[in-house]
Image (cartoon, rainbow, N blue to C red):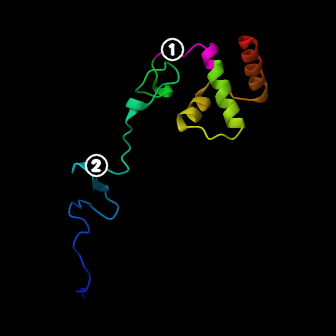
Amino acid sequence: SKNTNVDTTPRYKNDDHSGQFGTQRTLNVTGTREKVGSPIVHKSGIQCFNCKEYGHFTKECRKPKRVKDFAYHKEKMLLCKQAEQGVPLQAEHYDWLAGTDEEVDEQELEAHYSYMAKIQE
């Protein structure tokens, strides 16, 4: 027996769900469709920590790995200090710290600090 008191009309005018867990769509201000939860990432604002160019991640970089120069050590030292102090880092900074070849340990941090102290003298 079918319940006649149940509203079976779609909730939204532009509801195009194929099933209970179908792709969700919304209408933005301009009236164009926009997928919600889309796996597509707009990489135009993402900066590669290897070559410093925009549009790709370090893992996708085709250029040779960056030489670990003054800027590299300074940037890494500052990020490590911030992480030690509990300062929340942006996701790309965590990715960069995790993407470096070597693991960060106490000896390495000490080496970075002493290297930076010598350079700044």
Report which residue position mark 2 lands on. Answer: 34
Residue 20 % position (x, y): 33, 65
Q: Quadrant of residue 101?
A: top right
Q: What amino acid type is highlighted by mark number 2?
A: Glu
Q: Is residue 42 left or right of residue 111?
A: left
Cα–Cα gap, marks 2 and 1: 37 Å
Q: Is residue 61 magenta?
A: no
Residue 114 % position (x, y): 77, 18
Disc assigned to residue 42:
none
Find numbered disc 1 in the image and state the secondary structure of the residue it sits on: loop
Residue 11, compared with residue 69, is above or below; it is below
Res 102 visible: no
In what quadrant of the picture does the C terminus appear?
A: top right
Residue 118, compared with residue 74, is above or below; it is above
Q: Which residues are magenta?
A: 63-72
Res 43 visible: yes
- The residue depicted at 50 percent of the width and 26 percent of the height is 58
Q: Is residue 68 magenta?
A: yes
- The residue depicted at 57 percent of the width and 32 percent of the height is 93
Residue 59 % position (x, y): 50, 27
Residue 86 % position (x, y): 69, 41
Q: Nearer the viewer, mark 2 or mark 1?
A: 2
- The residue depicted at 68 percent of the width and 30 percent of the height is 80
Report which residue position mark 1 lands on. Answer: 64
Q: What amino acid type is highlighted by mark number 1?
A: Pro
Q: Is residue 60 left or right of residue 99?
A: left
Front-most of 72 and 121?
Answer: 121
Label located before the other in sequence (2 or 1)? 2
Find the residue positioned furthest to the bottom: 1
- The residue depicted at 73 percent of the width and 20 percent of the height is 112
